[in-house]
Amino acid sequence: MKLQRNGRTKALAIGAVAVVSSLTLAACGSDNNTPAASTTTSAASGTSASAAGADCGSGQLLGAGSTAQANAVTQWVKDFQAKCPGVTVNYNANGSGAGITSFESGKVAFAGSDAALKPADITATQAACPGGQGIDLPMIGGPIAIGYNLPGVTGLILDAPTLAKIFNGKITKWNDPAIKALNPTATLPGLAIQTFHRVDGSGTTANFTAYLAATAASDFPYAANKLWPAKSGQSANGSAGLAAQVKKVAGSISYFELSYATSGNISTAKIATGATAPVDATAANASAAAADAPVVGTGADLAIKLNYATKADNAYPIILVTYEIACDKGNKAATLPALKAFLNYTVSDAGQQSVASLGYFPLPAALAAKVKAGIAALA
């Protein structure tokens, strides 16, 4: 099974996470995302609640987690609620770690995560899934950009060892010889490097640390982790928080999804991987890096293994695939129809293509078919 390439990538204006229809997105919110009273109308779609109810379910559907997929979820909810006005979907973009915690405690019907569940997490989900457990359903992919604020410097090139030393506090000045060697024609200032990492548990952090662990272990001697493992650097909450810090702090550098960089007009580094040329952070290049990712989950779980160490031309290696986590069995009867309807829309061709312009790449047909079968089997 191979992930296909998709060449579409475009900027998304996001800033603060938008509220669409009845969707609640709280990038720094608590686990309590019970929606305020709201009314969903169907004037735009011309679809009545009664006509859609049989296929859509009804009532409130709560989700929480990944900020990386928040922009996609905003679009998905807007589209879904136009078709299914009898359902109110509320997604609290509070980070993958917080979303998984909410799911394990039974507060939400699904969680978004940029990293697959670990064995301990799967065990913890069983309390919320009577007779079953949480499973990973891949939903969308995208690049993790390395955003930087270095006045007068564009087209910055970095590689894994240099990034590892920067984020581990071993390289502290922008005119360090290692950075100069990668950027021989750039005028690099002697400005102090200020790194920013996520303070919250994050699948984006898990993927970024997995990349460093896979490609520069001697300079970043930590295992992949959703909590930032190194002692150096400053912290901020959520991808939006990291992007905001980079935008305002000269000499700063951080990691966040591409849409946060493009919406904030933040410069992003090219990554030297050993390929013919350094690689830009684009959805198409991220898709190329994920082209050989196999499914490694067992049973109904569809977790995949990404190749962070790729050296293929035009393959951007710092990537993530975001998952929706749901109970394979033991879902609440009142919300199961709406859950299945919403997830079916997100993995549909229409749902996948609706977010392609936001910096995401869609699942390949073969994997999407597995996800659709997994959604149909939810009970």
Image: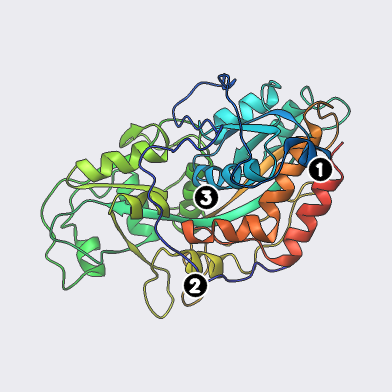
| x and y percentages locating residue 73 in the rendered image | 56, 44
Marks 1/3: CA–CA distance: 40 Å
Query: Vertically, is 34 above or below 300?
Result: above
Residue at 22% across, 69% down: 183
Query: Vertically, is 279 above or below 31?
Result: below
Q: Amino acid at mark 3?
A: Ala
Residue 98: image quadrant is: top right
| x and y percentages locating residue 79 in the rendered image | 60, 47
Which residue is tagged 2? 311
| x and y percentages locating residue 154 in the rendered image | 21, 64
Tell me, for residue 210, which label it has, or none: 3
Screen quadrant of the N terminus: bottom right
Tell me, for residue 55, which label it has, or none: 1
Residue 119: image quadrant is: top right
Marks 1/2: CA–CA distance: 45 Å
Counting other residues with Cα less than 10 Å from the Cα at mark 1, is it few (<14), some (14-19), or many (20 or more)? few
Q: Amino acid at mark 2?
A: Lys
